[in-house]
Image (spheres, grey):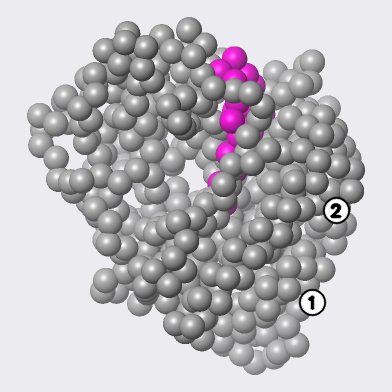
């Protein structure tokens, strides 16, 4: 959830000074963009995977601090709830057979983390929303011990002036309707973030392409159909996160105030457009001031930290987020894709990443880019439909009209993904294996969400209650997850 802060409370003067400092950072950032002083040799990719901790009954296990101490690996870090941790994958290049080694490294790391967890009676789950989360999960001390989390919780509720209202109805007709007096529902959402380092001149094209691709991504990768015992959207995580982090009471929604969880509202021409929108439309949530004068740093030839601008950006939850970062004193830009849920397996995770990176590259290289032929509203509608209906979604596509998501991927997007990965120098065997997983999902019509729903319905048909069926499903899910067989090949539990 971003950079740590030192304080959970802020004065009115701090807020005013912070706003001014963010504007100064933005001015300096514009100067940096004009001077082309950014690091870029070749595309670097990165990945973050949020994980759930469960006990032997597959219920949330509230001891991430102790688990992280047992894992003792800096790649694993805390997350919002005490049953969440995050796995950070080191930046790497896309070429040759590097994905093969990456898969082996990820499996080795997660297997070792699981081994150390199991010594404490805990287990790791990669899934968009843990189905065994209940209202009781968030009673008592559920939040990780981190000042940033408490500060965010307080800021969201203060901005709303009332409890968070959740109202989600799934295609099956089941409805979740409840109130929350904290950010707790947001903690149930565990995702995968994909990073891509880009040149400043090419950022807008990559961000626009990522927005176009978001709907198909969700349709293919949906893995969050249950929350609080209800069967909701194929990727419930999208709507749940949107509502749980909403700082607007009803009156501000009616006025058209933008939500904090934001798909966007237009195609962009520069990364500057997004940071300017941040400054113009979104009040500060964590107005912590840094002692650097960014203009002085820039004028002296140093790399400005732009700390306030970066911290502010970290509290605006775009599904494709712009990133300004510094490594070894050299600044760079990234597109952070936050669309996908965690899981179901490492091979599915890497297949999702290969599909995204390959298709994105081909879209950006197109002489007549898709976003010049598609309205932004259409991309927004595809995003919502992909999240709601998953692989059964019908999406609108230029030249195709309304088309089933699986057919769109098979006919249009998979060839683009192969082309894009080939252009990046990825070996044919690696492309065939990972994109073959995507093809398999389309041909079988089974992604993580479909398998979960089918498994629960089968177990309920055998007489189990919904709660028992969810536990039975997640037990079978865990076995498949550790076997690392792609989700489209999973058999349903016998019951």
Which residue is the site of mark 1?
491
Q: Is residue 233 above or below residue 312?
A: below
Question: What residue is at 74 percent from the left and 30 percent from the top?
Answer: 361
Q: Left of 386 or right of it: where is 417?
A: right
Q: CA distance from mark 2 to mark 1?
A: 20 Å
Q: Residues within 10 Å of mark 2 (few under 14, many from 20)?
A: some
Residue 417 - label: none
On screen, residue 69 versus residue 118, left or right, reads left
The boundaries of the magenta stretch are: 190-211
Residue 6 position, x and y percent, is: 20, 46
Residue in the picture at 68% in, 73% down: 482
Residue 129 magenta-drawn? no
Disc 1, SS = loop
Depth check: 442 or 105 in front?
105
Residue at position x 51%, y 63% in the image: 51
Residue 255 at least partly seen? no
Looking at the image, which residue sits at the far bottom?
463
Q: Which mark is residue 433?
A: 2
Q: Is residue 450 above or below residue 290?
A: below
Picture quarter containing residue 449?
bottom right
Frontmost residue, 305 versus 336: 305
Q: Is residue 331 above or below residue 413?
A: above
Residue 425 appearing in the image: yes
Quarter holding the C terminus?
bottom right
In this rendering, the label closer to the viewer, 2 or 1: 2
At a point 26% along the width and 34% down the height, the residue shown is 284
Residue 492 image point, x, y percent: 76, 78
Q: Secondary structure at mark 2?
A: helix
Residue 385 % position (x, y): 64, 46
Q: State the image quarter where residue 60 is shown.
A: bottom left
């Amino acid at each position: 959830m971003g950079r740590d802060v030192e304080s959970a409370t802020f004065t009115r003067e701090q807020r005013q000074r912070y706003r001014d400092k963010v504007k100064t950072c933005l001015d300096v950032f514009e100067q940096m963009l004009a001077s082309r002083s950014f690091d870029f040799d070749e595309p670097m990719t990165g990945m973050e995977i949020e994980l759930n901790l469960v006990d032997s009954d597959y219920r949330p296990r509230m001891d991430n601090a102790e688990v992280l101490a047992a894992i003792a690996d800096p790649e694993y870090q805390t997350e919002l709830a005490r049953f969440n941790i995050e796995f950070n994958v080191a930046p790497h290049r896309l070429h040759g057979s590097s994905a093969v080694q990456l898969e082996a490294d990820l499996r080795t790391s997660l297997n070792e983390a699981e081994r150390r967890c199991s010594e404490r009676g805990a287990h790791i789950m990669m899934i968009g929303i843990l189905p065994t989360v209940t209202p009781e999960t968030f009673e008592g001390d559920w939040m990780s011990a981190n000042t940033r989390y408490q500060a965010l919780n307080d800021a969201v509720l203060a901005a709303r002036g009332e409890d968070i209202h959740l109202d989600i109805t799934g295609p099956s007709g089941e409805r979740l309707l409840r109130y929350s007096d904290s950010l707790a529902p947001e903690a149930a959402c565990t995702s995968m973030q994909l990073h891509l380092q880009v040149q400043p001149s090419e950022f807008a094209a990559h961000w626009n392409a990522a927005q176009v691709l978001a709907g198909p991504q969700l349709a293919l990768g949906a893995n969050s159909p249950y929350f609080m015992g209800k069967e909701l959207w194929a990727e419930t995580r999208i709507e749940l996160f949107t509502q749980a982090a909403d700082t607007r009471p009803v009156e501000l929604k009616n006025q058209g105030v933008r939500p904090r969880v934001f798909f966007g509202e237009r195609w962009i021409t520069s990364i500057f457009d997004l940071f300017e929108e941040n400054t113009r439309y979104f009040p500060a949530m964590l107005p912590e001031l840094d002692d650097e004068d960014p203009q002085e740093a820039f004028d002296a030839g140093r790399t400005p930290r732009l700390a306030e601008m970066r911290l502010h950006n970290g509290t605006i939850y775009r599904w494709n987020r712009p990133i300004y970062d510094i490594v070894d004193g050299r600044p760079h830009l990234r597109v952070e894709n936050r669309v996908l849920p965690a899981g179901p397996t490492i091979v599915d995770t890497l297949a999702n990443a290969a599909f995204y990176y390959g298709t994105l590259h081909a879209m950006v290289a197109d002489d007549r880019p898709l976003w010049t032929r598609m309205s932004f509203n259409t991309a927004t509608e595809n995003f919502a439909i992909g999240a709601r209906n998953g692989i059964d979604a019908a999406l609108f596509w230029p030249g195709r009209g309304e088309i089933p998501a699986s057919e769109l991927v098979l006919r249009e997007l998979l060839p683009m993904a192969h082309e894009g990965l080939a252009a990046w120098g990825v070996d044919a065997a690696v492309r065939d294996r990972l994109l073959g997983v995507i093809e398999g999902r389309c041909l079988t019509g089974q992604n993580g969400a479909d398998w979960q729903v089918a498994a629960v319905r089968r177990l309920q048909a055998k007489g189990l209650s919904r709660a028992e069926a969810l536990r039975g499903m997640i037990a079978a899910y865990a076995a498949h997850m550790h076997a690392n067989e792609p989700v489209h090949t999973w058999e349903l539990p016998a019951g």
